[in-house]
Image (cartoon, helix red, strand yellow):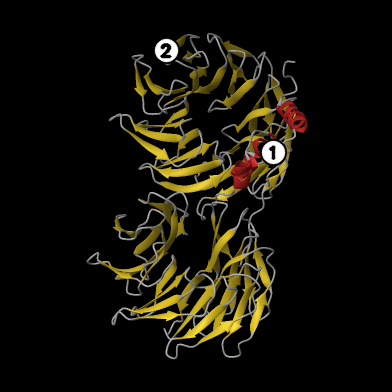
């Protein structure tokens, strides 16, 4: 269960790696927690409400009554009540059957947290007024717990309900005996104490502090053991169920698992920003962490993490799997392609081009690779011998190249305004001439008898390779970015900068516009059964179109232009890629199921996804919990360092303000622009 500033919470199935969004709040979601039986979730938001979600139906019930942001909410053990804490200075206890709430009034400042005792008869609240209060729900009496000299950040009951532990900005925690009213200070931290919680048996407390440490307190002796190892603020700490381990989360970007007997810790490294929280699974074999980098991670404490595949020295433009799923081929601006063996992690460079490699793909039998390059050539590589055959004939950049299904031909698309079909046995090529501007894409029909091309001249053309005849598909009013056949070869779908896609019936020549996007459409492709089309657009969305009804379902969630969208083999899901640096997996109802970093390729069996970030390839098992890395700041590095980024922009990526230096700015920017150019760029 996760809560996010994007206004949603998500429930994640750890076996499948899929998530269900809980949408309804109109501002950041501050917290989310399950009921004890796991059938409900309660969320809180800056929109001033809490919501109780039925996970079976997906329906939610708003809890409205607070007049300011709701910071926290939790269920009673029997799941019949919820208690909320708000910046309006009150807590509220909600009866979920009647929908009525009882305000708990007495604090004079924001209430930071509220939670039930195990038997549900009491609530404890913590407030910025420097006090905690214990509320007896039967007698309606309340008892202030006074002793702290600054904000109280958290308060929670022991399992038996006889004690409360509080954490305060005054640098101390306090354990309160509710029968006597006396408190014992836990002193030792040198800065604000952010959280405090009991072990299950109530004999220990763990605290976290802005002094960069956590401490485990033995309540009988009063002694504490510091947990030192983090290099920045420690936000949270919690015990394992058996009390032998503690997990901490820190602003240093790591979590740590501590063995309380030995005092040793294991760092959990992988997040790229503050780790806000960390907690154990019930059996103690896993830890879940949440981070400011926008990701949640589930850590298996017995196994380790997978290593990235590194080798390229510059941007990787794309990655695609072999048909059998055991290899990946990548194309890079460093002028090479690489074939990666996923079992060994080793790669074989394909060297021969003299400029950036724009695309690379396998033949159907996985014995060959075809690459397309800004040097004006394509190359066919024999993976057994390592030899390559250049396909020369274009007079400008080759944008892409792909094999026919039987592997005997290749089709290339070029900025010289032509496509070419290459016979790999004879080495001869047939130019497909007719376009009046760059050809953006070219692909074969499934039976290899036709090719469809898309061009900046605003048209697509269908080419009959036996007769040599071509048919223009005219109707778009701007550049056509892509064109592809349906599986049966009777239809073509095109995507255009005019903001539309079109489905063309090749027998009648008629087209049906797919209208709904508000900016350029980058790609369009059919589902395997030909009944649906998915489109990707610069408006930041993808859309799934039902061709019978003409209706579309928007896939909304990316925060930048969507580059591509395609169906899974079974047609039940869509994968999208975006300039926001992520790939996302969706169901056909528009629900987001997973997020990945980088530009993806899905293996033919649908079990793995390869993504590319900063020249590195990572292979994700789609059954595991999705991970969204903080790729955006890396992707925007040049802009943040050399562009017109404000100090506020830089702060979002944890970069310090910088004084402008016009001369250095010009020199650095020019050098980077020149460095991106292919070697044959016209002077």
* Dots 2, 1 in contact, CB < 8 A: no
**Observer able to see residue 358:** yes
Q: Dot 1, how many residues are within 10 Å of its Cα: few (below 14), some (14-19), or many (20+)?
A: some
From the viewer's perspective, is residue 566 above or below residue 43? above
SS type, badge 2: loop
For the image, the number of numbered tags is 2
Which quadrant of the figure contains the N terminus?
bottom left
Q: Which residue is drawn at the image coordinates 43% and 24% (left, top)?
A: 499
From the viewer's perspective, is residue 286 above or below residue 342? below
Mark number for residue 669?
none
Which quadrant of the figure contains the C terminus?
top right
Q: To which quarter of the image does residue 216 belong?
A: bottom right
Question: From the viewer's perspective, is 627 left or right of 571?
Answer: right
From the viewer's perspective, is residue 637 above or below residue 530? below
SS type, badge 1: helix
Mark number for residue 474?
2
Relative image position of residue 479 (x, y in whole percent)? 50, 18
What is the distance, in whole Å, between disc 2 and disc 1 at their CAs? 44 Å
Relative image position of residue 7 (x, y in whole percent)? 42, 50
Q: Nearer the viewer, residue 55 or 131?
A: 131
Which residue matches tag 1?
Answer: 641
Question: From the viewer's perspective, is 441 left or right of 428?
Answer: left
Q: Nearer the viewer, residue 515 or 70?
A: 70
Question: From the viewer's perspective, is 564 left or right of 59?
Answer: right
Q: To which quarter of the image does residue 408 belong?
A: top right
Q: To which quarter of the image does residue 106 belong?
A: bottom left
Q: Which residue is drawn at the image coordinates 50% and 33% (left, top)?
A: 561
**First reached walking from the N terminus: tag 2 or tag 1:** 2
Q: Nearer the viewer, mark 2 or mark 1?
A: 1
Relative image position of residue 566 (x, y in whole percent)? 46, 35
């Amino acid at each position: 269960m996760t809560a996010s500033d994007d206004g949603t919470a998500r429930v994640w199935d750890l076996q499948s790696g899929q998530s269900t969004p809980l949408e309804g709040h109109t501002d950041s979601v501050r917290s989310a927690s399950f009921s004890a039986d796991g059938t409900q979730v309660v969320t809180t938001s800056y929109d001033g409400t809490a919501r109780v979600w039925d996970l079976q139906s997906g329906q939610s019930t708003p809890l409205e009554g607070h007049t300011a942001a709701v910071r926290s909410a939790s269920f009673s053990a029997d799941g019949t009540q919820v208690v909320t804490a708000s910046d309006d200075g009150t807590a509220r206890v909600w009866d979920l059957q009647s929908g009525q709430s009882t305000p708990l009034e007495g604090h004079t400042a924001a209430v930071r947290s509220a939670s039930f005792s195990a038997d549900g008869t009491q609530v404890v609240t913590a407030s910025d007024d420097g006090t905690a209060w214990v509320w007896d729900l039967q007698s309606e009496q309340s008892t202030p717990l006074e002793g702290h000299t600054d904000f109280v950040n958290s308060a929670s009951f022991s399992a038996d309900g006889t004690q409360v532990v509080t954490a305060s900005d005054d640098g101390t925690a306090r354990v309160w005996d509710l029968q006597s009213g006396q408190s014992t200070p836990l002193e030792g931290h040198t800065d604000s104490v952010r959280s405090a919680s009991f072990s299950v048996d109530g004999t220990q407390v763990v605290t976290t502090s802005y002094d960069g440490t956590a401490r485990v307190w033995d309540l009988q002796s009063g002694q504490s053991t510091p947990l030192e190892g983090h290099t920045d603020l420690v936000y949270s700490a919690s015990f394992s169920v058996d009390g032998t381990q503690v997990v901490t989360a820190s602003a240093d970007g790591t979590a740590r698992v501590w063995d309380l007997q030995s005092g040793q810790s294991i760092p959990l490294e992988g997040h790229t920003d503050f780790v806000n929280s960390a907690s154990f699974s019930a059996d103690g074999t896993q830890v879940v962490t949440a981070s400011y980098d926008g990701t949640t991670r589930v850590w298996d404490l017995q196994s380790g993490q997978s290593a990235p595949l590194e080798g390229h020295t510059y941007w990787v433009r794309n990655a695609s799997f072999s048909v059998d799923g055991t290899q990946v081929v990548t194309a890079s601006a460093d002028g090479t392609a690489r074939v990666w063996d996923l079992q060994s992690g080793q790669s074989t460079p394909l060297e021969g081009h003299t400029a950036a490699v724009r695309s690379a793909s396998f033949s159907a039998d996985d014995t060959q690779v075809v690459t397309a390059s800004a040097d004006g050539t394509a190359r066919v590589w024999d993976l057994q011998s390592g030899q390559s055959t250049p396909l020369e004939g274009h007079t400008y950049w080759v944008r892409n190249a792909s094999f026919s299904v039987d592997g005997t031909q290749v089709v290339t698309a070029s900025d010289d305004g032509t496509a070419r079909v290459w016979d790999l046995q004879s080495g001869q090529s047939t130019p497909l001439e007719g376009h009046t501007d760059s050809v953006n894409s070219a692909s074969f029909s499934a039976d290899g008898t036709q090719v469809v091309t898309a061009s900046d001249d605003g048209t697509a053309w269908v080419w009959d390779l036996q007769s040599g005849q071509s048919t223009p598909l005219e109707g778009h009013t701007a550049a056509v970015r892509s064109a592809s056949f349906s599986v049966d070869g009777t239809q073509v779908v095109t995507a255009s900068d005019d903001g539309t896609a079109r489905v063309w019936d090749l027998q009648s020549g008629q087209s049906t516009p797919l209208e709904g996007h508000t900016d350029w459409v980058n790609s369009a492709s059919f589902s395997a059964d030909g009944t649906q089309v998915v489109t990707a657009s610069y408006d930041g969305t993808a859309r799934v179109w039902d061709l019978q009804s003409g209706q579309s379902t928007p896939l909304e969630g990316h925060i930048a232009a969507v580059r591509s969208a395609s169906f899974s083999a079974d047609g039940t899901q869509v994968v999208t890629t975006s300039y926001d640096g992520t790939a996302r997996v969706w169901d056909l109802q528009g629900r987001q199921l997973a997020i990945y970093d980088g530009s993806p390729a899905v293996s033919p069996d649908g079990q793995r996804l390869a993504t590319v970030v900063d020249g590195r390839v990572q292979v994700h098992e789609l059954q595991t919990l999705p991970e969204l890395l903080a790729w955006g700041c890396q992707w925007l590095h040049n802009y943040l360092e050399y562009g017109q980024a404000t100090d506020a922009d830089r702060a979002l990526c944890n970069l310090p303000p910088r004084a402008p230096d016009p001369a250095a700015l010009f020199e650095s920017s020019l050098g980077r622009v020149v460095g991106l150019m292919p070697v044959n760029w016209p002077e």
